[in-house]
Structures are given as structure tokens and as C-alpha cells.
Image (cartoon, helix red, strand yellow):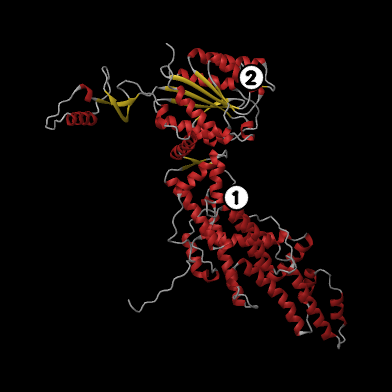
């Protein structure tokens, strides 16, 4: 329409609806980079949410903001402001009364004033029946009671601000009916009765006193309990003397009936929401004297921020982003913070929906799909290091008919059983015929025209990769390359040599077989010990489960053996190593050698004891020793695996 005018500007109402969604694969790759760098898998996944993906804000940013707001709230002022204000009004009232009595002869009133207790609350109690001579003094005294009463009730019920101005018997009666109905509703709820209808009747009758408009009884309890808990924390935050002063003032201001109703309400709310820190106090500092309502509001804010800090910390077992109260985040930290939580929730949901992560009792972990991508990344890094080698150089070619087509062909030789390459064969015949001056059909085939499609027969291998998990591997920066190497080899076997069987064996003081997921998630252990004997024993069991395959054992370690298994299955550790540990380890080497296994060792570091040991093992087993830089470990291991699997067991 020609008359329409439009204005454009920055979007402020929640997340940008046109913003691209998080790149979930990029988030998975970010986690993978950190895992391949040596970090814990669970820590990397947790930090993805805590720190946020690249160019995004995470839970740590929101937690830091909540901590700043908590510090600001603690500096808001002095919690004893209600008593201080009452003292000031009382002093004004007494001064006005003495001015009124100065021209009179009234020894009784003067005696009462002269003998008032120093305690503000006790002085106000003694003056409850006093016949004020000054109208101004009487008004000031009543302001103490009315003001505190209003503050207490307004703090507990946000919608009663206008209903309690002055002493209105009708407002007092309505307040009493509302609290009585509320106590009855909460009592039914606590007994497990169905309160949906009762809640609706309560809101129809008293809903204007609850501007937050709770949608059900649970929301009503949440709102009231937070306010009541803040009031209790206010009392707990005062010194014993201050607490007594304020309590006595409140008792006097509320009166017996209202005080009893509020006490019953507080007890009900405390039993329904016991986790709100009812008995916790805080030390607030500041130059301003906070009134009762402001002091309780500050403590209520601190209490809610404490809950948010716990939720945003995600430290307890089984914590999820669904634990975060988004409404509380928006209420305390702002709309943009709530939008950040929603985006992180969506990221986690999308990671789970697309099958990249799963959740167990300990939190998020990578799915098999993500582990395959992680392995692919690790292998790609290794192949980058191979620096221009043709991958085909590592594969085995022979004349067997069984195998995979590799896209090339060669001239047929007598005895070949490979499939015929029809296109190239006919092409050879046509070119030969053209060269001889003939062009008519049909084309006659000669023996020299025939070409066969080349295939590769992949030798089936059974491989055990034994990786050192001792703490020195982590301390010396070898943990990440070790993981990358093992994951790369695992992915290579899975995708290019599926007929091979790979078992990863990790060894520290004990050895254990590791799946791809367990390897990605494993963390360094402070327990000392390098039990290569146990690792080779597990490797031997794996080899013997595949008797027809080429046996290959690859060992990655940075220290000589310092532990072995005793007859009872317990690990024995000592440093420096003992002849018994070396003897038992060499016995496993001999058994693998007799079985026909290729045993190659990758030595990290320059430990003289390790050098002597691996040289002796290599000489004894006929294997090889490599001393790669830690950054080239993956290239060495993958290249050696491909070469070793081409061997043949002696018959």
C-alpha cells in the first residue's frame, strides 16, 4: 500500500529471529579439538555449555554477572534501618511531647518519659497506654507502628500496599480473611488434597492482592515462600540484640491476631519449601539505613541469586540446563541473560536430537556418531602429517581376484583372475584397428587388447595398540597426542580396514581394554605404575581370539616397566623397577614373539632405562623401535600399522 510507512531498527524483544542457529557440527568439532589436545571429554562438553560456543556467551558469563550483583546487594546498606528509623521517630515524638509539657505542671507524664527504657522496642511497649498531651507526638508514635506494620505486610504480600494505608478496619478485616483463606488452602495442599478448585476460588476472591498472578497453587507457594524466607533471613542476619529489638517492634505493630496468622503461614511455607535457606544470615554493609521492606528485599535478592549461582554452576551430579530457572534469570539478570540460557538449552537439545551427544548419570558424553567424527578429525591430522604420501602406497596389491577395485587397470597376463576392464579392452582394440588403417565394425579383439581391473587384497590383521596412561604422559604433554593417535588408528581400521580387529589397551598400574568412547573420556590418574606386562597379556588374549589374522602389537610408552601382576591378580609397583618386573614383562614379549606377532615400540622421551629396555625387547622379538617427536606420534603409528599388516605369519 502506497501510504504505509515502516521503521527499521535493532531487534530488542528476545533472541534475534533472523539470527542463524548455532553450528552444531562446529560445536562438536570444538569439543573434539580440546579432547585431541588432551583435555577431559566430560570437561570439554561441560565447558561448551559453561563457556558457550565460539562467539557466544555461556553459563560462566551469567554466573559472573550474578556474583557481581550479589556483591552489590551486600553493599546496599545497614539492615538495622527499621529499628533506627523507629528510634528517630520516637525521639521526635518525645521531643514534641516534652515541648508540650514544658508550660504545664504534669509530674506524672514527665516521670513516665524520664524513666523510659533505653531499648527502642521496650520504650514503645511502655508508651502503648500513654495519654499523649501532644497531638504531633501521638501522630509520630502511631507512624512508628503503622509504618512498620505496613512494611511487614507489604513485604509478605506485594499487592497490599494501598490496602493498608492508615488504620482502616475494613482493610484489616479483609487482610485477616485473606490470610485465613490462604492458610486453609495451604493446609489442604500439604495434606495432598486436590486444590485446583480451591485455588481458583481463592484467586477469584483475593486475586487483586497478588499482582504477579500465579497460575496455580505451586506458583503461589513459590512467590510467598521466597518472601517469607527473605523475612526470616533478615532476622537471622541481625545481631541478637538487634533481632530482639526488631521482633518486639513487629509484635507490637502487628498485634496478636495478625502475628499469629503470619506465624502459621510462615510455618506452612517453610514446610512446603524447606530448601530456601530460611536459617541463613548475611552480613550487609553500607552507609544507608534500609527499612524493613528494603532490607528484606535485598536479602530476598541475595537468596535468589544464590539459587541461580547453584543452578548456573551445574556442579551437582545429573545437572542439566533444565534445572536453570529461566524466569528467575530474566527477573534478576535481565532479558538478554534469559535469552542466552534459552540458546544454550537449544544447543544442548539440538546436539542430542541430531545424535551428537547422549546423557548418562555423570552428564553429557559423545555419541558413537560424534566419536566417528572425532576419529575422522584425528586421522585427517595424521594424514596431513604424512605430507604428500599416496595413501595407496600402504595397501597390498596382488593378483587375487577377491578384493576391492581401485580404479586402475593393467595389461592382462596369463593366469590373471581379476575382472575384465571392458571399456579399456575395447578402447585398446579400436585404437589398434585405427592405427592399422581399418575402421569398419565389428572390432576383433586380440590378446594384447585385454586389460584387467586392478584390485587390492587387504590382509586381515589383528592389532593391539597398547598406550601408556601413566601420569607422566599427562604431565609431559603427551596425553593429547596419545589420544589423537589411538583415535586416528581406530577410525582408520573402522573405515578402511573393517576386516581388521583392533583393541586399544591402556595401562598404568593396571591395564584395561578401552572402547573408542572410553578412550576419548579417560582422564589421567595420579596412581603411579607402568604395567606393560599386564598390557601385553591382554594384547595376547586379543590376538588369540583371531587366529587366522596377521598379529600386530604396537606399544606407546614414555617409561620402563615399573609394575606387574602378582599371582593373586594384584598389581605390584616399585621404582626403580625390579628384575622380577622386567622378567615377567619379557616373558609376555616372548609369548607374543612365538605366536608370530610383530611387536613395535614407540618410545617417547629420553629415559635411559626405557631405552635399554626397548632395545632389548626389539632385539629379542625382532621388532622395531621408534623415537618420534610427540607431535609426529600419530604419523609413525599409523604408518607402521599399515606396513606391519602386510606381513605374513610364518607357517
Residue matched to label 2: 612
Residue 319 placement, left or right of 5: right
Binning the other alpha carbons within 10 Å of mark 2 as few (below 14), some (14 to 19) or many (20 upward) gives: few
Vertical order, 576 against 440 (above or below): above
The x, y position of residue 353, in whole percent, is: 42, 46
Q: Is residue 446 visible?
A: yes
Q: Residue furthest bottom?
A: 103
Q: Residue at x 77, y 65 (%)?
A: 245
- Residue 630: image quadrant is top right
Which residue is at a point 54% across and 34% down the rendered structure image?
Answer: 483
Residue closest to the eye, 297 or 201: 297
Who is closer to the viewer here, 648 or 152?
Answer: 648
The residue beneath circle 1 is: 313
* Of 218 and 389, the residue lying toward us: 389
Secondary structure state at the residue bearing disc 1: helix
Foreground tag (1 vs 2): 2
Amino acid at each position: 500500500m502506497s501510504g504505509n510507512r515502516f521503521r527499521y531498527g535493532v531487534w530488542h524483544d528476545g533472541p534475534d529471529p533472523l539470527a542463524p542457529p548455532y553450528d552444531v557440527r562446529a560445536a562438536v568439532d570444538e569439543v573434539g579439538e580440546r579432547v585431541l589436545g588432551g583435555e577431559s571429554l566430560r570437561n570439554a562438553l561441560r565447558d561448551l555449555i559453561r563457556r558457550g560456543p565460539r562467539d557466544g556467551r555461556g553459563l560462566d558469563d551469567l554466573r559472573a554477572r550474578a556474583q557481581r550483583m550479589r556483591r552489590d546487594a551486600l553493599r546496599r546498606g545497614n539492615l538495622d534501618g527499621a529499628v533506627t528509623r523507629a528510634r528517630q521517630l520516637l525521639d521526635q515524638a518525645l521531643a514534641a511531647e516534652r515541648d508540650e509539657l514544658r508550660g504545664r505542671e504534669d509530674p506524672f507524664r514527665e516521670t513516665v518519659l524520664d524513666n523510659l527504657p533505653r531499648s527502642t522496642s521496650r520504650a514503645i511497649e511502655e508508651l502503648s497506654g500513654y495519654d499523649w498531651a501532644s497531638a504531633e507526638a501521638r501522630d509520630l508514635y502511631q507512624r512508628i507502628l503503622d509504618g512498620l506494620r505496613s512494611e511487614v505486610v507489604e513485604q509478605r504480600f506485594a499487592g497490599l500496599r494501598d490496602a493498608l494505608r492508615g488504620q482502616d478496619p475494613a482493610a484489616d478485616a479483609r487482610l485477616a480473611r485473606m490470610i485465613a483463606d490462604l492458610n486453609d488452602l495451604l493446609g489442604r495442599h500439604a495434606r495432598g488434597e486436590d486444590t485446583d478448585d480451591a485455588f481458583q476460588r481463592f484467586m477469584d476472591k483475593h486475586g487483586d492482592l497478588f499482582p504477579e498472578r500465579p497460575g496455580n497453587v505451586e506458583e503461589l507457594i513459590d512467590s510467598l515462600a521466597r518472601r517469607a524466607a527473605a523475612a526470616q533471613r533478615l532476622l537471622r542476619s541481625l545481631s541478637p540484640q538487634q533481632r530482639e529489638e526488631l521482633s518486639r517492634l513487629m509484635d507490637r505493630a502487628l498485634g496478636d491476631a495478625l502475628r499469629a496468622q503470619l506465624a502459621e503461614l510462615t510455618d506452612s511455607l517453610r514446610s512446603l519449601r524447606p530448601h530456601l535457606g530460611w536459617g541463613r544470615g548475611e552480613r550487609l554493609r553500607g552507609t544507608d539505613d534500609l527499612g524493613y521492606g528494603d532490607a528484606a528485599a535485598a536479602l530476598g535478592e541475595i537468596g535468589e541469586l544464590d539459587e541461580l549461582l547453584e543452578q548456573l554452576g551445574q556442579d551437582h551430579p545429573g545437572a542439566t540446563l533444565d534445572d536453570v530457572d529461566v524466569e528467575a534469570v530474566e527477573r534478576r539478570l535481565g532479558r538478554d541473560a534469559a535469552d542466552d540460557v534459552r540458546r544454550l538449552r537449544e544447543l544442548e537439545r539440538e546436539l542430542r536430537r541430531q545424535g551428537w551427544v547422549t546423557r548418562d548419570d555423570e552428564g553429557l558424553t559423545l555419541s558413537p556418531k560424534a566419536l566417528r567424527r572425532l576419529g575422522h578429525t584425528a586421522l585427517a591430522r595424521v594424514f596431513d602429517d604424512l605430507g604428500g604420501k599416496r595413501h595407496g602406497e600402504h595397501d597390498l596389491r596382488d593378483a587375487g581376484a577377491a578384493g576391492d577395485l581401485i580404479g586402475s587397470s593393467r595389461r592382462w597376463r596369463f593366469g590373471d583372475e581379476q575382472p575384465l576392464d571392458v571399456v579399456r579392452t575395447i578402447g585398446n582394440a579400436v585404437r589398434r584397428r585405427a592405427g592399422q588403417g581399418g575402421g569398419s565394425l565389428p572390432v576383433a579383439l586380440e590378446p594384447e587388447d585385454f586389460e584387467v581391473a586392478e584390485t587390492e587384497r587387504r590382509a586381515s590383521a589383528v592389532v593391539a595398540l597398547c598406550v601408556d596412561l601413566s601420569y607422566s604422559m599427562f604431565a609431559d604433554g603427551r596425553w593429547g597426542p596419545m589420544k589423537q593417535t589411538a583415535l586416528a588408528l581406530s577410525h582408520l581400521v573402522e573405515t578402511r580396514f573393517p576386516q581388521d580387529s583392533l583393541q586399544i589397551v591402556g595401562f598404568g598400574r593396571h591395564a584395561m581394554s578401552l572402547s573408542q568412547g572410553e578412550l576419548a573420556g579417560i582422564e589421567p590418574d595420579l596412581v603411579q605404575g607402568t604395567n606393560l606386562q599386564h598390557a601385553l597379556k591382554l594384547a595376547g588374549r586379543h590376538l588369540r581370539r583371531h587366529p587366522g589374522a596377521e598379529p600386530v602389537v604396537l606399544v606407546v610408552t614414555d617409561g620402563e616397566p615399573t609394575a606387574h601382576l602378582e599371582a593373586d591378580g594384584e598389581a605390584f609397583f616399585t621404582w626403580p623397577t625390579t628384575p622380577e618386573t622386567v622378567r615377567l614383562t619379557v616373558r609376555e614379549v616372548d609369548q607374543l614373539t612365538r605366536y608370530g606377532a610383530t611387536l613395535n615400540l614407540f618410545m617417547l622421551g629420553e629415559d635411559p632405562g626405557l631405552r635399554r629396555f626397548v632395545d632389548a625387547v626389539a632385539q629379542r622379538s625382532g621388532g622395531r623401535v621408534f623415537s618420534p617427536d610427540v607431535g609426529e606420534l600419530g604419523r609413525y603409528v599409523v604408518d607402521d600399522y599399515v606396513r606391519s599388516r602386510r606381513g605374513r605369519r610364518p607357517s
